[in-house]
Amino acid sequence: MARLSQLSRSVAGKVVLVTGAASGMGRATAELFADEGARVAVTDLRHDDCETVAARIRKAGGDARAWALDVADPEAVPGCVQEIARTFGGLDVLVNNAGITAGGPIDGDDFEAQWQRALEVLLTAHTRLVRSALPYLARSGEGRIVNIASTEGLGATRGMSPYTAAKHGVIGLTRSLSMELAEHGITVNCICPGPILTGMTEPIPEAAREKFARRRVPLRRYGMPEEVAHMTLSLCLPAASFVTGVALPVDGGLTIQNT
Ligand code: NAI
């Protein structure tokens, strides 16, 4: 049957760079894009683990290569992005996903260190990745940036101010860059995941996770990393060309539940 829609729902052949792709949502995102025919740069601090992810993708018939990249290293980012673009012949999609937990009370001894680290990894790194990727994304004609924020970017949890401030910053950065990069045809959006089962939440005892989900999440469970990855993919489809500056909660209803 002839296709009726003129707007493509395929990312086949697109070159995608995912940060923090050795685990959790980054891994799921890399695997999903590869399943959909994209060519994926799997990057992470943990080189062996991202090599494993890339090898698994290749074994399943996909196209992926691994790069060790610490997003908080200003010296490393430009060269790595350049090498990825050279290897794949361009860059169409940047997913700023790498993250850490960082928190502690404002009067804690460790506060300054937590604050610096949170802003460095969760916010400043995004700007560096975007600056390095910009020439390639602009050349793509359908450039896409997706930043992984958090429901902590829309609300707040006591004692988490470094993380919460950084994630609020990610939403602000997303909105601002969506204005600035529109002239290059690049869309900039962010996702605000609620509680998701990943390396980050694994240390939380199961009983505590279940209690939290029952009390706070209308769908009464943690989300799976793949459920976030699918929304990231959706924002990167050619057909999503008129969506920019959005902060999309993927949270089982957490942010709209009043009581
Ligand atoms: P995860 O711990 O499973 O994965 C995070 C990955 O980022 C790891 O592979 C880690 O090695 C990598 N990473 C950490 N620092 C890095 C650095 N400096 N450079 C490069 N890679 C680095 O955690 P998850 O949950 O998949 O985290 C992904 C993103 O989702 C993070 O930005 C996190 O803040 C965010 N998020 C997570 C939620 C959750 O409930 N799991 C909820 C809301 C947001």
Image: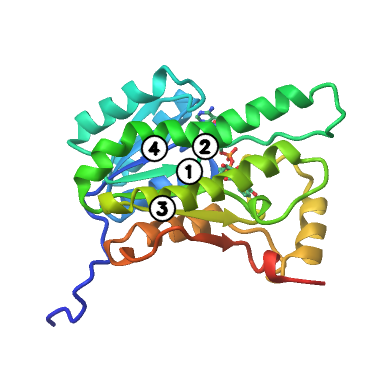
Tell me residue 233's x, y (percent).
Answer: 39, 57
Question: At numbered mark 2, what does the secondary structure look like: helix, strand or loop?
Answer: loop
Which amino acid type is shown beneath numbered disc 1? Answer: Gly
Cα separation between marks 3 and 4: 12 Å
Residue 194 location, quadrant: bottom right
Tag 4 or tag 2, which sits nearer the N-term? Answer: 2
For the residues labelled 2 and 4, say whether their Cβ atoms are less than 8 Å apart. Answer: no
Question: At numbered mark 1, what does the secondary structure look like: helix, strand or loop?
Answer: helix
Under 8 Å from ligand 1: the CB of mark 2?
yes
**Which residue is at a point 64% across and 26% down the rendered structure image?**
117
Q: Which residue, given by chain and number where applicable, does mark 3 sit on?
A: 178
Number of the front mark, 2 or 4: 4
- Name the quarter where the N terminus is drawn: bottom left
Q: Which residue, given by chain and number where applicable, does mark 1 sit on?
A: 26
Tell me residue 219's x, y (percent).
Answer: 68, 70
Question: At numbered mark 4, what does the secondary structure look like: helix, strand or loop?
Answer: helix
Q: Which residue, given by chain and number where applicable, does mark 4 sit on?
A: 130
Question: At numbered mark 3, what does the secondary structure look like: helix, strand or loop?
Answer: helix
Under 8 Å from ligand 1: the CB of mark 1?
yes
Which amino acid type is shown beneath numbered disc 4? Answer: Val
For the residues labelled 2 and 3, say whether their Cβ atoms are less than 8 Å apart. Answer: no
Number of the front mark, 2 or 3: 3
Which amino acid type is shown beneath numbered disc 3? Answer: Ser
- Packing grade of label 1 (10 A; few <14, some 14-19, many >=20) is many
Which amino acid type is shown beneath numbered disc 2? Answer: Ala
Number of the front mark, 4 or 1: 4
